[in-house]
Image (spheres, grey):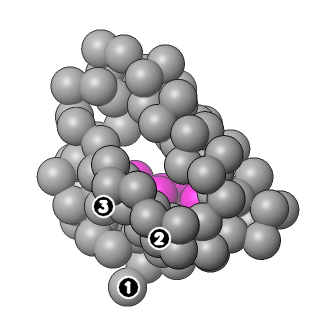
Amino acid sequence: MSDNSEIVEITPDLTILFNDYYAFRTMLMDAIAKKPKSIILNLGDIPVMNSISISSLVWFLKNAKSEGIQCTISAIHPDLLNTFEVLNLKEYIDHQ
């Protein structure tokens, strides 16, 4: 994760999502705590997410929005995008 007062970029690792979801949630919480204008999340290398990681992601997107932080998903793996479509969670994705 790179830190800039204007933009924070997050690129989670698949191993973290499945083996240490707490680290993923902490990564997301830390990004919000920095109060940047924008957070960019790269999910291009994440083909699947478990339910805990998905709930953490939805929590993150809702909380960032309530803090006035623009969140953008810069890349999303096609399989993960399909999962979001099936779960009717596409509304939470601002994908470029």
Residue 84 within the segment the image draws in magenta: yes
- What amino acid type is highlighted by mark number 1? Gln
Choose the circle earlier in sequence order: 1 or 2: 2
Q: Can residue 58 be seen?
A: no
Q: Residue at x 32, y 49 (%)?
A: 1
Residue carrying label 2:
7
Q: Can residue 43 be seen?
A: yes
- What amino acid type is highlighted by mark number 2? Ile
Q: Which residue is situated farthest in the left direction here?
A: 45
Q: Residue at x 37, y 85 (%)?
A: 96
Q: Nearer the viewer, residue 36 or 40?
A: 36
Query: Secondary structure beneath disc 3?
Result: strand
Magenta residues span 83-90
Query: Secondary structure beneath disc 1?
Result: loop
Checking the image for residue 16, the label placed there is none
Residue carrying label 3:
42
Q: Position of residue 5 (x, y in %)?
A: 53, 66
Query: Secondary structure beneath disc 2?
Result: strand
Residue 45, compared with residue 39, is above or below; it is: above
Q: Nearer the viewer, residue 73 or 51?
A: 73
Q: Which residue is situated farthest in the top direction here?
A: 19
Q: Position of residue 58 (x, y in %)?
A: 63, 49
Residue carrying label 1:
96
Q: How dense is the environment of label 1, judged by Cα within 10 Å: few (below 14), some, or many (20 and up)?
A: few
Q: Which residue is situated farthest in the bottom direction here?
A: 96
Q: How dense is the environment of label 2, judged by Cα within 10 Å: few (below 14), some, or many (20 and up)?
A: some
